[in-house]
Image: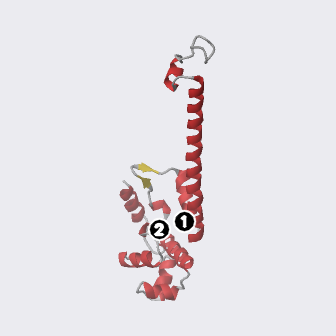
């Protein structure tokens, strides 16, 4: 399904530069600058001339699979990173991600590595805090049930041990 979308989109691209090559080129340039390479340095690492890398970054040249693989390795990115977001369908397991999750991914991609590390630490702490709060709420509910007497199921059914007397200390 996603592959059909990709081929439909690709067939509409025609001459160079086009939306695909410009989008991929912009992502190559962003990753190169983030990694701190000059065009000449990166071109040497991917076995291309500096002029060819410039053409790729400006959308005037298509990348072959080999160049894409060299870029991914040298810029520490996945191959999917270099495809414009409108072409990539994100899924977690068998579910497609929501627009909100997609926006989060896009924002995350724009950060440098140290900021990404910080975002991941904060997100991890938020999950820990949420889990702790839920645990405390569950414990509090259980303690209240035990104080009143009986189990949560009995209370739900209206059959607590103290029912009928109005006094939990009376047998």
Circle 2 SS class = helix
Q: Residue at x 63, y 13 (%)?
A: 166
Q: How is the image coloured?
A: secondary structure
Picture quadrant of residue 87:
bottom left
Residue 163 image offset from top left, x and y in percent: 57, 14
Q: In the drawing, what numbered circle is on residue 81?
A: 2
Q: What residue did someone put label 1 on?
A: 109
Left-right relation of 139 to 52: right
Using the image as rendered, state which of residue 151 and residue 101 is in the foreground: 151
Q: Residue at x 59, y 52 (%)?
A: 126
* Vertical arrangement, residue 30 with respect to residue 138, above or below: below
Circle 1 SS class = helix
Q: Is the Cβ of the residue at disc 2 closer than 8 Å to that at disc 1?
A: yes
Q: Residue at x 45, y 85 (%)?
A: 52
* Vertical arrangement, residue 95 with respect to residue 17, above or below: above
Q: In the drawing, what numbered circle is on residue 147?
A: none
Please count the marks in the image: 2
């Amino acid at each position: 399904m996603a592959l059909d979308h990709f081929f439909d989109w690709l067939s509409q691209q025609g001459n160079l530069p086009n939306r695909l090559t410009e989008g991929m080129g912009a992502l190559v340039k962003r990753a190169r600058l983030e990694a701190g390479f000059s065009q000449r340095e990166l071109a040497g690492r991917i076995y291309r001339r500096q002029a060819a890398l410039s053409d790729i970054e400006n959308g005037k040249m298509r990348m072959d699979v080999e160049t894409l693989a060299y870029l991914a390795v040298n810029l520490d990115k996945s191959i999917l990173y270099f495809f414009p977001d409108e072409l990539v369908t994100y899924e977690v397991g068998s579910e497609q991600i929501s627009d909100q999750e997609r926006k989060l991914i896009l924002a995350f991609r724009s950060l440098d590595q140290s900021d990404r590390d910080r975002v991941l630490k904060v997100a991890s702490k938020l999950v820990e805090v949420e889990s702790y709060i839920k645990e405390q709420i569950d414990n509090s509910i259980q303690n209240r049930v035990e104080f009143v007497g009986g189990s949560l199921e009995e209370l739900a059914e209206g059959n607590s041990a103290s029912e009928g007397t109005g006094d939990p200390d009376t047998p």
